[in-house]
Amino acid sequence: MTAPVFLITPETLEPAGAAATATSGARLTLTGPEAHHAVSVRRLRPGERVDLVDGRGLRLLCEVTDTAADGGRRERLGVQVVERVQEPDAGLTLVLVQALAKGGRDEQAIETATEVGAELVVPWWAERCVAVWRGVKAARGRQRWQAAAREAAKQARRARVPEIAELHTTAELVDWTRRVRAAGGMVLILHEEATRPISEVVLPEAARVDVASSEPVGAAGDDPQGHAGEPPVLAVVVGPEGGISDAEVGALEDAGATMVRLGPHVLRTASAGPVALAVLAQRAGLWG
């Protein structure tokens, strides 16, 4: 069985800054909520294997050396590093553009897309969305999605946690699409009336090119800060329960997006995106 994964931050790993330099033989201490889960929920014991990850590709393969619990959520997990692994970027950056949905279906999509390998999720306030994020609800919604991605990444034993972008209107999504295309990426609109199957789309080359910054989906009008060496974006756009309007499809296609059909059946908003990303990941060799 694979080792459980726990997320580390500069505030929850001792000694301070150890993640940047820790190599085989280093002794570290995990604190905070992750340590509580490891000690009081998982009840890990000395000699067991654990992986500590930073959510950005660093994985420290460790062995538990000691535990401490006082019942006050100040548990501590002592480990010794067995191996340090920096996982390379994939050849393509998988992105899910997910319209807001009711009943938690959007969060279900986030969880499964994370397991598939999505690196970024863009919340989209589409024309026919029943769910609405306004004011504090937008911040809380984004936090819920980020928490879902974080827990799914741990469950999937990933060393990378997808970023949840700011909520996008259609106008902002159109601008984002235009910038992705200009950087050599691809945006695919999943639509039941499309005639072109997703299996026939020519994928962007898994080359090292400039794409948008670590905030590639900021508000419309923001200038993306190019970072050399990042892989091109391969994104799928999933509409709400009521579907994507003709006007939205037209605006996205004018910006460079391509409308495709996923398969012979109409999938729910909770499953369409993850299934499409799985098909694309397999085609691109990311699961090889």
Image (spheres, rainbow, N blue to C red):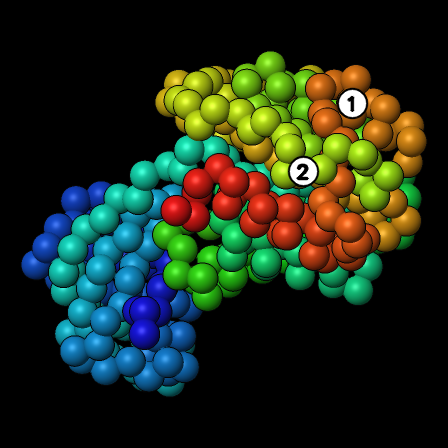
Residue drawn at (78%, 22%), measured in percent from left and top? 253
Q: Residue at x 75, y 40 (%)?
A: 261
Within-10-Å neighbours for mark 1: few <14, some 14–19, many 20+: some
Residue 155 visible? The answer is yes
| Earlier residue among tags 2 and 1 | 2
Q: How many marks?
A: 2
- Compared across the picture, whether 97 is left or right of 94 comes to right
SS category of the residue bearing label 2: helix
Q: Nearer the viewer, residue 161 or 147?
A: 161
The picture quadrant where one finds residue 197 is top right
Residue at image position (39%, 47%) is: 288
Mark 2 vs mark 1: in front: 2
Q: Residue furthest left?
A: 25
Q: Position of residue 249 (x, y in %)?
A: 84, 29
Residue 139 horizontal/vertical position (percent) = 68, 48
The residue indicated by pointer 2 is: 198
